[in-house]
Every structure is written in C-alpha cells, then in structure tokens.
C-alpha cells in the first residue's frame, strides 16, 4: 500500500508552531514533527531559498513510534538542505523550524497566521542557519574557503566600523577616494593591477585556481536574490551559514559582495561571474546593495540595541525593491516583520483570492499616505510605475514584472523644494478613494521635451549613446555661459553630493559658491571631461550622420577652455590615456549621473530639468507640502495625473517660496 500524503494536525493557540527533527537515516529523508510553544521550546530556524517550485524530493514524516505516517513534498533545494543539515557537525539531534514543512502549505488560513508570526519565530530561534547550497568538490571547497579566510583577515575591525558609519556603498567609495577610509592592500598574488595584470587566459585560470569562482558563486548565490531572505537574516542575533556540511561565519560570506561593490576586490573576477551558466537573475549591484542593507541593519542592532528602531515599510520597500519574490503580495508581507509602522498600518498577511496584488497595492498606498507625515511615498511609487498600469498615478504597483530595469530616481531627503517638509493637514481622498488631494501649487511648465532614454537603456548601445550626446549638447545655446555649463552638469548629476554641500557653502561664504569663478571653473572642467568621455568611443568611427554632432561637441570643448582658462586642461588626444584629473572628474560624474530612463529639457521659466519618463510640452511642475521632490503632472479631466519626479535647477532649495507664505499661495491639487 503506497504511503499517503501527510495529514497535518491543526495548531492550537496563537503561539504554537511545528518543529522537526531530522532522522539520521541516510537512505531517505525522514523527519519527526512536534507541536511546541514558540517562546519556550529551543529550536533553530533555517533560512533558505525554495528554488525551483517543482517538488523533486519527499520527506517521510515519522509518528511518535517511529513509523512512517505520510510524506511531504519538498523542493530540490530544501531536499539538499535537509541532507546537509543531517550531516553537519553539531547539528545532529537538533530541532528546526522550516517553513515548507512546518506550515501546512495547503491551508491558507494557517499560512496567513504563521506568516504573521515570522518575526517572533525568527527572533525566538536559538540560531538562524542560512543555507548556501550543497558542497562542490573537495578541491573547490578547499580553494574557496582558504581564499575567503585570507580576505577576511586582511581587513581590520576599525575599517568595517567606518564602512558601517558611511551608511551606503556610494559613500564608502567616496570616503575611500577621499582617504577617510584607508583600505589595507590586497595580497599581491590576489590583486590585479596594471603592473601585474596577466593575460585574459591567465585571469580565467587564476579565477578557478585561487578559488574566486567558488567565492563569487557562494557569496552571490540565490540567497542574495530573494526577498523573504531579508528578514530572516536580520531578526536573530545568532546567525551562521551552511555550505554542504560545513558551517561558515555569516559575516565572512556576506561581506564579499560589499568588498566587490566598493571595488576592493578585483572587478575582472566579478565580471567573469556573468559568464557562469547559472547567471544571477538579479543584477550584481542590486545584490550588493541588498546585502549591505542587511549587514548594516544587523550591526546597527548589535551595537545600539536599546535605541535601534526598524525602518518604515516605505523605506524597506524602496531599499529592497530589486529583490525577487514569486507572489507580488510578498513585496509587503516579506518585510512586515522589519517595518516599524506595520502595526500602525494595520496590514496582515492575506493570501486569499479576494486580496489580489492590485487590491493590496491600493490599500497599502492609501494607508501609507493617510498615516504618513510626508509624501516621500509618492516618489517611490512613481519609480515602480509601469506605462500600462490601471492603478491611480499615486499608487504603488506591486505587480511590477520581475527584471524590469527601472529608471533612476532623484534621491530623497536631499532637496527642499517646498519649505513645509511635513503635511500640516493630512492628505485626503475623494472620488471613491481614487483621487488624492494634497496641498501645493504649480511652479513652472515644460517648454521643450526631448525623447529621453528608454527603459531598457544600454550604455553599450551606440545609437542610444549618440542620441544621449545629441540631447545633452542641445541644452546649450551657441553662446552659452559658464553658468549654463554648471546648471546643466548639476541637472545631469542630480544625485551628486555637491547638491547638498552647495547650500552650506552659500551660507558660509566659502570659496566655491554657485556664483564664484572657482565653482564655475570646477564645474566647467567636470563637464569638459564628461563630454570627452562621451565622445571618446566614437572618435575614430564617427558615423557620417554624426559628423555635425561631433563638430559641435569640439566647438563646445574649445569654448569651455576659453571661458574657464585657469583650469589645467591636459594636452592629450582622444587616443591617449586620460590624465589623473580628467579621469577623476569622469569617475565622479559617472558615479552620480542620473540619466537612465530620464529626459532633459527646459521649462517655460528657462530652467534646465531632469525628469523621470518622457514628459510632454505643457506638462506642469508642482511643489507639494510634505514632499522633498518636485513632480511633473498632466491634466486628465478635472484632476492631474502624476508623470514622475523632476529636478529643476533653481527650484530645488525652496527658491519659489522665497518671501512667500505657502499657507497663502498653496491650494488643493487633485491627483488621479
């Protein structure tokens, strides 16, 4: 008689969970299941990726007498994890909580209740074990772990503290360039510098023989790509990783993507990882940003436990937006446990058919906007918006397809286009909840609208590169000034740190003021270097139709040298290596340029703008109370439709409200 599928016994009480013990039987996967109280019974929690949804394995469930009571389907990855847990030193005879087995996956009511308990489950566990997959060959494992140990020992704790203090990968890079963070040199045999750069074949050989292939595969494997993994990594103080039967310190593995992201580890090896047959679904820089966020949270909680508070749901949605999940509703449910406003928002997991992703999107958006003290949520929701979305323009669309390469966004908490940084009066809704009513006013209108970059913009696509170059120089009139050059550069690099520092310099009277020659000369040199960078790949294969374009570029370069003669322009041709100064300027701009998915032009007021999506002539630029962005809107009936965020040079620091009382000039603006 064939063994039946296991029948779950219902859980009793709000704090009851199931845990399992793995049998030592090597012939098949066997587990015994026990009902326990989450707060009193010692257990470990497994953090893993389900992987392919096809159930390639089975676990036989034993009753209290040790007889087979039924079977439970397992994904291949969980089957591998159970086999490795069974043989891992120090983990025999232990109890584990593993969602795929310990939650009845066929009971939505239980699933909703247990998912709501995730925070408590992962917090109460003695330890969280992150599964990194089965081991490779003995030689691969030896090479990889030895390389990992060498890298880990090379970076002192003080350096890691500085990298935590920086708060972002971008700032770490800046601090390294400014010598605020001084990195220990990588051992010479591991480094790839201009002086010791081997041939490409030798790079590939070292990639395997030194263990880089193993290191990158393990550190960037699927555990870095799935949203549910995030809360599982941060909720418990005690965490480790499991690779095959070997336990590896979590920090050692998790910091590898960070070290690649800050360009401490050789980028050639990072690039080689793209050629693997199991190439990541997530972009490498997105995985690196995700891991940095998890690592940062873990250490912030460890060092400042009494004062530490979770980020808001909106912030978590924004930070982890590239990470993958199969069910669009998990965009919310997978991070509720680490969102400080989850209770106030009143959101609980609901996987019923009546709660579609679209319904949850509307509910989430209206609750966040109604309870929030500012309108930061609008900028985030617009960054996810799809051209064919049927949701109101102020709504976050949780159903964004996986792998969409979204346009860049203006950073939050940098600009103050409206002097009122919070909502004095809560936003309200009309029209059966589809119209958002906020306070603000129209500041300007779009006068010229260029085509902009497409959503799938590719920096290696020559026609698009030339289109962007054409769009850029068209912003300059034939008789441009240094002020025009500075304004355009600031508009291109709307994410640059000088956007923040300029105000401080203006107030202090220090050199480098927006109106000073020092400032304009510096910006002119940066623009000159950037324009040469854009021209360089095409200089010796200029398409016939682009010759006029490049002739204009050459004249702009010469005019900049005339307008700002005090700059040290290197006497180099395009086929020469760039000077240190020119290379540094280009590096800075490429770090902060905001061009992907953006378009550029002028407003009716003659100001330069950098807008999300393709705007149209006549679109309005509005400022809203409680928003640190300006927005482009388009009239749709009696209300306006949000098109996207916009950087308008000369309006980002509240200039439109100078000597004006916002309570007098602001009015209701209806957004549909």
Image (cartoon, rainbow, N blue to C red):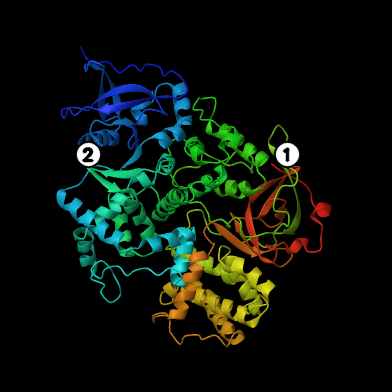
In the displayed image of the protein, which residue is found farthest to the right? 664
Per the image, the residue denoted by label 1 is 428
Residue 435 locus on image (x, y percent):
70, 39
Q: Quadrant location of the C terminus? A: top right
Q: Residues within 10 Å of mark 1 (few under 14, many from 20)?
A: some
Of residue 298 and residue 438, the one placed in the foreground of this image is: 298
Q: Quadrant location of the N terminus? A: top left
Residue 236 locus on image (x, y percent):
41, 41
Of residue 4 and residue 503, the one placed in the foreground of this image is: 503
Of residue 358 and residue 181, the one placed in the foreground of this image is: 181
Q: How many marks?
A: 2
Q: In the picture, residue 479 is in which quadrant?
A: bottom right
**Image position of 280 (left or right of 433):** left
Per the image, the residue denoted by label 2 is 88
Residue drawn at 74 percent across, 64 percent down? 655
Residue 635 appears in the picture as rendered: yes
Q: Is residue 607 above or below residue 625?
A: below
Answer whether labels 2 and 1 touch (C-beta < 8 Å).
Answer: no
Residue drawn at 58 percent across, 69 percent down? 498
**Tag 2, which secondary structure?**
loop
Q: Is residue 66 above or below residue 632?
A: above
Residue 544 appears in the picture as rendered: no
Residue drawn at 43 percent across, 85 percent down? 572
Residue 58 locus on image (x, y percent):
26, 26
Q: Nearer the viewer, mark 2 or mark 1?
A: 2
Residue 662 locus on image (x, y percent):
79, 55
**Tag 1, which secondary structure?**
strand
**Image position of 75 (left or right of 607):** left
Q: Give the mark nearer the N terminus: 2 vs 1.
A: 2
């Amino acid at each position: 008689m064939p063994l039946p599928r296991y029948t779950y016994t219902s859980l009793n009480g709000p704090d009851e969970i199931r845990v399992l013990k793995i049998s030592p039987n090597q012939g098949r996967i066997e587990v015994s299941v026990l009902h326990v109280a989450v707060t009193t019974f010692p257990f470990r929690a497994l953090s893993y990726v389900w992987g392919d949804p096809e159930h390639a394995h089975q676990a036989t469930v034993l009753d209290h007498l040790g007889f087979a009571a039924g079977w439970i389907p397992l994904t291949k990855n969980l089957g591998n994890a159970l086999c490795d847990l069974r043989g891992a030193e120090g983990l025999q005879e232990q109890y584990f909580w593993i969602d795929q087995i310990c939650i009845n996956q066929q009971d939505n009511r239980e699933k909703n209740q247990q998912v709501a308990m995730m925070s408590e489950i992962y917090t109460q566990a003695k330890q969280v074990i992150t599964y990194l997959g089965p081991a490779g060959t003995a030689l691969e494992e030896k090479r990889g772990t030895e390389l990992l140990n060498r890298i880990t020992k090379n970076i002192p704790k003080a350096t890691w503290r500085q990298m935590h203090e920086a708060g972002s990968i971008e700032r770490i890079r800046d601090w390294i360039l400014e010598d605020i963070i001084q990195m220990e040199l990588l051992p010479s045999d591991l480094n790839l510098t201009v002086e010791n750069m081997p041939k490409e074949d030798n790079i590939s050989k070292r990639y395997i023989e030194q263990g880089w292939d193993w290191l990158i595969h393990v550190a960037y494997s699927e555990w870095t790509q799935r949203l549910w993994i995030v809360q599982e990594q941060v909720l418990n103080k005690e965490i480790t990783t499991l690779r095959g039967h070997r336990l590896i310190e979590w920090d050692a593995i998790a910091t590898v993507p960070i070290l690649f992201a800050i360009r401490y580890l050789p980028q050639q090896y990072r690039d080689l990882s793209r050629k693997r047959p199991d190439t990541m679904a997530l972009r490498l820089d997105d995985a690196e940003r995700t891991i940095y966020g998890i690592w940062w949270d873990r250490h912030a909680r460890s060092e400042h436990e009494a004062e530490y508070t979770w980020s808001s749901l909106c912030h978590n949605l924004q930070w982890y937006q590239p990470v993958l999940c199969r069910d669009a509703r998990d965009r919310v449910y997978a991070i509720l446990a680490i969102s400080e406003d989850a209770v106030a928002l009143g959101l609980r997991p609901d996987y019923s058919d009546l709660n579609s992703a679209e319904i949850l999107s509307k509910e989430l958006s209206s609750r966040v906007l109604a309870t929030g003290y500012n309108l930061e949520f609008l900028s985030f929701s617009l960054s996810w918006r799809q051209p064919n979305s049927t949701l109101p323009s102020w709504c976050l669309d949780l159903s964004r397809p996986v792998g969409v390469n979204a346009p860049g966004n203006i950073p939050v908490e940098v600009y103050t286009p409206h002097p009122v940084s919070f909502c004095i009066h809560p936003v309200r809704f009309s029209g059966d909840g589809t119209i958002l009513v906020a306070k603000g006013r129209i500041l300007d209108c779009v006068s010229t609208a260029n085509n902009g970059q497409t959503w799938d913009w590719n920096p290696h696509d020559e026609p698009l590169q030339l289109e962007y170059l054409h769009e850029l120089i068209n912003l300059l009139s034939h008789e441009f000034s240094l002020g025009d050059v500075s304004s355009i550069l600031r508009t291109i690099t709307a994410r640059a740190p000088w956007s923040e520092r300029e105000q401080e310099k203006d107030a202090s009277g220090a050199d480098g003021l927006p109106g000073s020659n020092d400032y304009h000369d510096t910006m002119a040199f940066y623009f000159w270097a950037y324009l040469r960078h854009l021209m360089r790949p095409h200089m010796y294969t200029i398409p016939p139709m682009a010759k006029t374009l490049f002739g204009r570029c050459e004249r702009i370069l010469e005019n900049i040298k005339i307008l700002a003669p005090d700059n040290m322009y290197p006497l180099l041709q395009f086929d020469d290596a760039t000077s240190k100064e020119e290379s540094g300027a280009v590096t800075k701009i490429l770090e902060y340029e905001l061009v992907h998915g953006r378009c550029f032009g002028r407003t009716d007021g003659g100001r330069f703008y950098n807008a999300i999506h393709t705007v149209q002539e006549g679109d309005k630029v509005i400022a809203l109370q409680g928003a640190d962005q300006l927005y482009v809107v388009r009239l749709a009936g009696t209300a306006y439709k949000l098109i996207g965020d916009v950087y308008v040079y000369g309006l980002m620091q509240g200039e439109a409200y100078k000597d004006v009382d916002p309570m007098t000039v602001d009015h209701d603006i209806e957004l549909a």
